[in-house]
Amino acid sequence: MSEKGEKKKGIIQPGESPFGRYVNLFGQRIPRYAIKQIGRGTFRTQNRPLSDPLIRAHLEGKLYVAVLGKWYPGYAIFDIDSRSEAEAEEIRASAGLDKSNSMMYSSESKDSHHVIWIPEYHGKPPTLNLLGAVLKNFVHMKRVEIYPQRGRPIRLPFGPHQSLRDIEYMGLHSWKQKLYWYEKLDPLDLSSISHQQLILDFEPGPGRLELPTNIFQEAEVLMSEGLQQPSSRHHSQWLILNYLFRQNVPRDTAAAFVWRWINERHNGFSKDFLQFPESVKLDIKSLANHIWSKYHVGQVYPDSTHNVHHGYITEPDILDIIKVAKGSKPRMSFFFQILKFAYPRQHRKFIPYHRDRLIKWSSERTYLKYLDELGEKGIVQRGSSYLSEGHPGLRAFAKEIKLNWRFRDSSEAVLIEGRAIETFDDAVRFVFKDRPDGFRQLLIKEEVEQSTASMMINSIWRED
């Protein structure tokens, strides 16, 4: 694969396993990064997007690469300097972290340590701003730093010069092994950390926000070649900002990127910029704030966060789901969601399914029945249920579930413009395209009545 093609896919795909998963989790390409030679010098900022070959060079131990944070970072690192390993362990434990939900590895300086973990906030992905705000008191009291950050880069994890400190992980040498065990870690809810700064949680606003589609090619042309015609500045800024949101770029970083872009690539097509540049700058900031705010309140995530948080599924799974559910539409839809949620969490011993999710995917009356049926088929193994602690009044009742399933490679994920499909109906339309007869034949094979199959097909393929 070419560098150009690999770079684009690495940003928006769940992953070309395992390198793509690594980039998806930790890499931030836009707008800049920093590099440092092994054993000498300091980090030097590179004001251009990060490429795959440099990430591979870091993982091969040829140099260090440091990156900025994403809007939804997906991981957190406590940077602990000038402390013994025992002191670092105490700090780690005081945050509620241990070997089941974090990994500790060496930093470059003596008596310096990095503790990497997976943050959540009330079961949702936290933004970079939220991560820093919630942990403000904790990091101040413990005299540590929290990364990633918007303006200061942090060294990518799991390079060969970053040795793991936990006895259980000391035998891991390749970054692929380290990534595998990292993906088995349980997330830690920020609300459980002592001395946390209480932040008011919220529910999504009314209605469902739709992301603009078919913007990638046009946005990439604009970014590389600039404005294409007169009176196109505002729409072009909107396209690029939406593109950057979907790439998980922080809001202020994206606004600064577009401001630099219009300065360098207006091509003489914007009268407003030539006459009133400060007004254009304010317009960019206002537009970025509107885009990022509405999606945050609506809990519409960038592609990488969406795919990791809500999950993804592969095309062969759709065919297997039809067989497992014997063509029953409610059961197919339920198992589709169970399996999709499991994919990015498949390495964990048990996956916690919030009761509210299970009810949303079926009903309060049927979700236990469907789980029991999957259990009888040997697909679902249920662990103990539990109540999440640390936030009284929060409905955090969940079921621990382990799936006995042949998980496919994430490169086979069913995606539309790099974004995982959300419903079983969408997946069926994607797999069978405009040929519902193929779906009908599978239903008939599972002994679904002709009239029922026809009703199901009309429901899935009906015109909106």
Image (cartoon, helix red, strand yellow):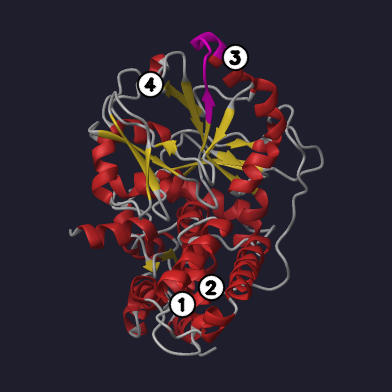
Mark seen at residue 91: none
Whichever of callouts 4 and 1 sits on the residue coming sooner in the sequence is 4
- Crowd class of label 4 (few under 14; some 14 to 19; many from 20; radius 10 Å): many
Type of amino acid at the residue the image marks with label 1 = Thr
Type of amino acid at the residue the image marks with label 3 = Glu
Viewer can see residue 362: no
**Inter-mark Cα distance, 4 to 2:** 40 Å
**Inter-mark Cα distance, 4 to 1:** 42 Å
Residue 296 against residue 396 in the figure, above or below: below
Q: Which residue is mark 4?
A: 164
**Tag 2–tag 1 contact (CB < 8 Å):** yes
**Inter-mark Cα distance, 2 to 3:** 44 Å
Part of the protein shown in magenta: 78-87
Q: In the shown orientation, is residue 38 left or right of residue 305? A: left
Mark seen at residue 90: 3
User: Percent from the top left, x then y, of residue 348?
Assistant: 45, 36
Frontmost residue, 108 versus 175: 108
Whichever of callouts 2 and 3 sits on the residue coming sooner in the sequence is 3
